[in-house]
Image (cartoon, rainbow, N blue to C red):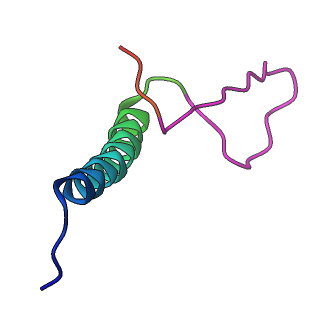
Amino acid sequence: MVDQTQEEILEVQTKNKQIKYAADTTKMFDEWLKQCPIVYYLSEPVEPGEACVEYTFDTTTRRK
């Protein structure tokens, strides 16, 4: 087994936490989107006369 310094261990743990945080954030967003009361279109055409609003979501950060 390779010896690691305490700094290297902390660096790996921090990186793993960042990866888990990003994955959890994406998962939470996907769950929220399934329950969202707003009808959203991915690539479907909008009916004539309907208002079209575009939202941009950032799934890498969380806001409270």
Quadrant of the image containing the N terminus = bottom left
Residue 9 image offset from top left, x and y in percent? 20, 58
Residue 51 position in % (x across, y down)? 78, 18
Q: Which of 11 and 64 lies nearest the eye of the viewer?
A: 11
Was residue 44 drawn as part of the magenta stretch in this picture? yes
Name the residue at 66% across, 26% down.
55
**Nearer the observer, 43 or 25:** 25
> Eyeballing the image, is 3 above or below 51?
below
Q: How many marks?
A: 0
Specify the farthest residue to the right.
48
The residue shown at (16%, 55%) is 6
Residue at the limit of the structure toward the top, as seen here: 64
Quadrant into which the C terminus falls: top left
35 above or below 27?
Answer: above
- Residue 43's x, y, as percent? 73, 49
Q: Residue furthest left?
A: 1
Nearer to the camera, 56 or 7: 7
Compared across the picture, whether 8 is left or right of 32 comes to left
The residue under the point 40% across, 26% down is 62
Q: Is residue 1 magenta?
A: no
Q: Main secondary structure of the magenta part?
A: loop
Task: Please determine whether, in this image, residue 46 is positioned above or below residue 24.
Answer: above
The image quadrant that residue 45 belongs to is top right
Q: Is residue 59 left or right of residue 29?
A: right
Quadrant in the picture for residue 41: top right
> Residue 52: horizontal and vertical position, in percent?
78, 23
**Closer to us: 61 or 4:** 4
Which residues, given as a range, are shown in magenta? 39-60
